[in-house]
Image: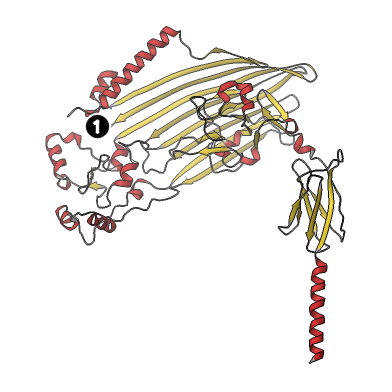
């Protein structure tokens, strides 16, 4: 017995000594290989574990590793990451080497480019690899999660609605909350026309230093976008085709009352639902149920086709891209759609050693159909959430109408709209609602908008001596947009038709048509406008007064008559 106890004690002591022998203390100093100065905050991590430490003010570190054969990973921003094997050593001094590839990488800042090692402002850089193969066709949405301090807001899921960019929160130093947008040196009002696959790099200037270049308009930050230039594949032109299909649906379906739950809810509110159901022809015990969310929303597809052709040599480059997007929204029916055809031409050529010319031009043709969805009245979304599940989608005949609708139909039947399937839009017999049937709100109006936009930049680079580049740019932006609204109810259009002299036959009225031309030239750091569709002050005042009076008349058309 004594022999067994003695053997057990020896075995436990041996195990403990082995375990203690496996833990090893390592100390050392980390310095820069360039100047041998101690480095503060260098991260040292034992591979395969969460065990790590950082260097102190003198560059010293101390870490306990699990065994003498452990491997350490040493890393610091701007320096090459090192992997070091312990090999039983207790003292390991480390020399960190600069990562010149990272420090020499250039980013676009204001009028030119700088190396990252020379940057003094807050700049976030996103390159083409970071936004490759994203399930989005919006350049703004491609920034989501790619740059610190940049928020991407999607306030609407309607096709053609671009994402909103906010840099370091909200500010009120101007009438614009979004940042200044610059594409290939041209100031633009949006970047929705850009397909992410055409972007070479995106730089976000986030601090107040950007105002020194662009003035107060850059108070909310600046987004600088550079589109791709041509390059060859082994000395040959490169042609690519890409197809993208994006499936769209509601991200979260609202949990609403079913028919029986809604009846119980109304009974708890004090209503005699059994009597009301019998009076309105609804089976109290087994009511038919309408899921308005499923009736209004469904799955849809957004498809995109892109063709690019590019080439380049030591004298010049060109990049051509044609992109077509067809986005059918998640609302059932062809009432919310967005189509866009864009073409991009980027070219540059070295005429002589001291002169280089080039252009970046984009052409956009777009069209949208919209539904009302962000308003208190006339919205399709409000009745989708509020209309009771006992109301059917359609009524087959006038006999199904409530009494109030029968009275209207008897005196003025054209006020009751007929659905495309020949039936009547049903309304609730159990509650008063200002919006009615959501499909009625969808079909009663046909709102369309379309436009054609040309944005271009032509530049000349002069290099009189090595190291000095003088750049002159000519910017052109031409935009023409039309917006039309069509009501199905002619009685609502009579006064509008009188104001606009539109044809009464199709009840279509063009409410807005505008064209703008923007020309600008800048050389070096100087910038001046040649023209911006400006009118003399007197003419501008007359135009504003005329449009304001027209808008007042339009508001009066829709203002309810006094009771």
What residue lies at 53% left-to-right and 38% top-to-bottom?
152
Quarter of the figure with the C terminus: top left
What residue lies at 38% left-to-right and 12% top-to-bottom?
543
Quarter of the figure with the N terminus: bottom right
**Outermost residue toward the bottom in this view:** 1
Q: Nearer the viewer, residue 235 or 149?
A: 149
- In which quadrant of the rendered view does residue 222 lie? top right
Density class for disc 1 (Cα within 10 Å; few <14, some 14-19, many ≥20) is: some
The residue singled out by tag 1 in the image is 489
User: Residue 295 location in percent, x, y?
Assistant: 33, 48
User: Residue 19 location in percent, x, y?
Assistant: 79, 70
User: Residue 87 location in percent, x, y?
Assistant: 86, 60
- In which quadrant of the rendered view does residue 449 lie? top left
Q: Is residue 272 above or below residue 36?
A: below
The type of colouring in the image is secondary structure
- In which quadrant of the rendered view does residue 211 lie? top right
Q: How many marks?
A: 1
What residue lies at 55% left-to-right and 23% top-to-bottom?
455
Q: Is residue 400 above or below residue 230?
A: below
User: Residue 344 location in percent, x, y?
Assistant: 58, 28
Direction from residue 191 to residue 78 in the image, left or right: right
What residue lies at 51% left-to-right and 44% top-to-bottom?
245
Q: Secondary structure at mark 1?
A: loop
């Amino acid at each position: 017995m004594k022999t067994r106890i003695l053997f057990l004690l020896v075995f436990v002591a041996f195990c403990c000594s082995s375990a203690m022998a496996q833990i090893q203390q390592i100390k050392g100093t980390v310095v820069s290989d360039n100047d041998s100065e101690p480095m503060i905050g260098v991260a040292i991590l034992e591979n395969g574990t969460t065990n790590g430490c950082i260097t102190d003010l003198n560059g010293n570190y101390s870490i306990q590793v699990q065994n003498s054969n452990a491997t350490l990973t040493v890393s610091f921003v701007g320096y090459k990451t090192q992997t070091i094997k312990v090999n039983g050593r207790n003292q390991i001094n480390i020399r960190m080497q600069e990562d010149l590839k990272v420090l020499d990488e250039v980013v676009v800042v204001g009028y030119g480019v700088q190396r990252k090692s020379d940057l003094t402002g807050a700049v976030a850089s996103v390159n083409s690899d970071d936004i490759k193969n994203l399930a989005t066709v919006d350049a703004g949405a491609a920034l989501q999660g790619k740059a610190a301090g940049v928020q991407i807001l999607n306030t609407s899921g309607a096709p053609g609605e671009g994402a909103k960019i906010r840099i370091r929160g909200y500010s009120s130093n101007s009438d614009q909350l979004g940042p200044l947008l610059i594409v290939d040196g041209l100031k633009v009002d949006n970047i929705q026309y850009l397909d992410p696959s055409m972007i070479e790099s995106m730089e976000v200037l986030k601090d107040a230093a950007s105002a020194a270049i662009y003035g107060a308009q850059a108070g909310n930050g600046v987004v600088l976008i550079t589109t791709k230039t041509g390059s060859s594949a082994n000395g040959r032109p490169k042609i690519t085709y890409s197809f993208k299909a994006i499936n769209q649906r509601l991200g979260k379906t609202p949990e609403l009352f079913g028919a029986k739950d809604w009846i119980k809810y109304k009974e708890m509110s004090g209503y005699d639902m059994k009597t009301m159901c019998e009076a309105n022809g609804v089976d109290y015990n087994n009511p038919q149920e309408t899921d308005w969310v499923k009736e209004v929303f469904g799955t849809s597809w957004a498809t995109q086709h892109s063709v690019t052709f590019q080439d380049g040599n030591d004298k010049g480059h060109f990049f051509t891209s044609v992109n077509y997007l067809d986005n059918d929204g998640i609302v059932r029916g062809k009432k919310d759609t967005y189509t866009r055809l864009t073409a991009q031409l980027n070219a540059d050529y070295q005429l002589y050693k001291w002169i280089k010319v080039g252009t970046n031009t984009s052409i956009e043709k777009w069209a949208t159909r919209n539904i009302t969805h962000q308003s208190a009245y006339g919205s399709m979304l409000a009745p989708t959430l509020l209309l009771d599940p006992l109301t059917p989608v359609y009524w087959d005949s006038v006999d199904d109408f409530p009494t109030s609708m029968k009275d209207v139909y008897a005196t003025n039947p054209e006020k009751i709209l007929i659905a495309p399937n020949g039936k009547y839009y049903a309304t609730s017999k159990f509650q008063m609602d200002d919006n009615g049937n959501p499909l009625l709100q969808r079909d009663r109006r046909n709102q369309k908008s379309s436009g054609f936009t040309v944005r271009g930049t032509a530049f000349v680079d002069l290099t009189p001596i090595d190291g000095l580049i003088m750049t002159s740019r000519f910017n052109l932006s031409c935009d023409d947009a039309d917006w039309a609204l069509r009501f199905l109810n002619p009685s609502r259009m009579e006064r509008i038709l009188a104001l606009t002299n539109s044809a009464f036959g199709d009840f279509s009225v063009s409410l807005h048509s505008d064209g703008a031309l923007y020309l600008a030239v800048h050389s070096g750091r100087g910038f001046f406008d040649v023209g911006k569709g400006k009118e003399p002050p007197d003419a501008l005042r007359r135009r504003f007064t005329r449009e304001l009076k027209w808008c007042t008349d339009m508001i009066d058309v829709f203002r309810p008559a006094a009771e």
